[in-house]
Image (tube, rainbow, N blue to C red):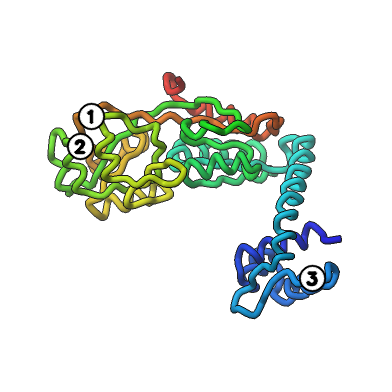
């Protein structure tokens, strides 16, 4: 009977397609990984990976182990989570996923305060685009996510709660050709690339529809992807600072940079755009004490009037 450790080994090797990298990820030597794989193959009587093509490729039998192993590992993760839930806040951990702007505005600060109050708690922050953050919760990878509220659409296995709405500002470097214009027309923006994370379609108003159609491409999932797609606010800011790219972000993130002249805010004649963020959790899943306290810490950080 394959063990959980052996299934983890097969999954890691399939992900990395390289024995040394997989062994490093597992924290074992390459020879130990090879011996464990051979022992599992001998036990099952089949070959799980083809090794003669330069990189290990799962065979039909390896694919079966991966398919069934995914469920077993998820169930084991749930088992460990339920035990941690029973133990409370003194042990166990919490994993939070956040999209680009919430991963700057609230998530790290709240996790830091949670860790300060409970030193033995393991805290993990996964930052990425909004869709991946919500997928993490849907798939049981994370306990809670903070992401664009638009991602709630079609997520029947999730509960969402509106957290805050923030005004978005468009910005550029001080030397940008558009920086000294009092009002920038949407057509003027088309001459320059946009840098930032994917946007949900729900953010786009009718007045900006032409701009979006020209400057963004539509991903299969419906997200609007800029020409310079980045996964963090700091990467966006650096890209804008060193090029004629244009960026956008919540005004609160840019207030100090505007005040000190690091960036210039662009004023357009289009209506202001606001981004609405929500908390996401798995439906019918009892939140852990750590998750409950994390959510309380996030809400306590919001200024009055931020929540809708």
Q: Residue sitting at 58 percent across and 30 percent down?
A: 295
Q: Closest to the observer: 256 or 80?
A: 80
Foreground tag (3 vs 1)? 3
Residues at marks 1 and 2, CA–CA distance in whole angstroms: 8 Å
- Residue 259 in sight: no
Quick one: label 3, few (<14), some, or many (20+) residues within 10 Å? some
On the image, the x and y values in percent for residue 293 come to 63, 30
> Badge 3 is on which residue?
46
Residue for badge 1: 270
Q: Is residue 271 left or right of residue 277?
A: left
> Is residue 173 shown to the viewer in this render?
yes
Q: Where residue 186 is drawn, which disc sits there?
A: 2
Percent coordinates x, y for residue 122 in the rendering: 66, 45
At horizontal 56% and vertical 37% (from top left) the residue drawn is 145
Residue found at x 19% / y 48%? 191
161 relative to 100, above or below? above
Q: Quadrant of residue 50?
A: bottom right
Q: Residue drawn 37% across and 46% down? A: 225
Quadrant position of the N terminus in the picture: bottom right
Q: Where's residue 232, x and y in %?
A: 42, 48
């Amino acid at each position: 009977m394959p063990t959980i450790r052996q299934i983890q080994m097969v999954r890691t090797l399939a992900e990395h397609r390289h024995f040394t990298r997989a062994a490093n990820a597992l924290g074992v030597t390459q020879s130990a990984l090879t011996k464990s794989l051979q022992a599992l193959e001998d036990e099952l009587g089949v070959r799980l990976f083809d090794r003669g093509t330069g990189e290990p490729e799962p065979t039909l039998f390896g694919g079966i182990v991966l398919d069934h192993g995914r469920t077993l590992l998820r169930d084991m993760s749930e088992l460990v989570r339920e035990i941690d839930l029973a133990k409370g806040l003194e042990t166990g951990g919490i994993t939070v996923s956040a999209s680009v702007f919430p991963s700057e505005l609230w998530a790290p600060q709240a996790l830091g305060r949670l860790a300060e109050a409970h030193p033995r708690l393991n805290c993990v922050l996964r930052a990425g685009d909004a869709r991946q953050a919500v997928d993490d919760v849907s798939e049981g990878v994370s306990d809670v996510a903070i992401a664009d509220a638009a991602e709630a659409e079609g997520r029947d296995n999730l509960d969402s709660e509106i957290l805050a709405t923030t005004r978005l500002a468009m910005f550029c470097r001080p030397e940008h050709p558009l920086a000294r214009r009092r009002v920038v027309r949407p057509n003027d923006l088309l001459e320059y690339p946009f840098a930032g994370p994917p946007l949900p379609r729900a953010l786009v108003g009718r007045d900006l529809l032409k701009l979006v159609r020209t400057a963004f491409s539509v991903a299969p999932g419906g997200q609007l992807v800029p020409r310079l797609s980045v996964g963090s606010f700091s990467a966006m800011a650096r890209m804008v600072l060193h090029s004629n790219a244009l960026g956008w972000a919540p005004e609160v993130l840019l207030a100090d940079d505007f005040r000190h002249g690091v960036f210039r805010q662009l004023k357009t004649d289009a209506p202001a755009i606001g981004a609405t963020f929500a908390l996401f959790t798995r439906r019918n899943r009892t939140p852990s004490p750590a998750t409950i306290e994390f959510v309380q810490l996030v809400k306590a950080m919001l200024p009055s009037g931020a929540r809708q």
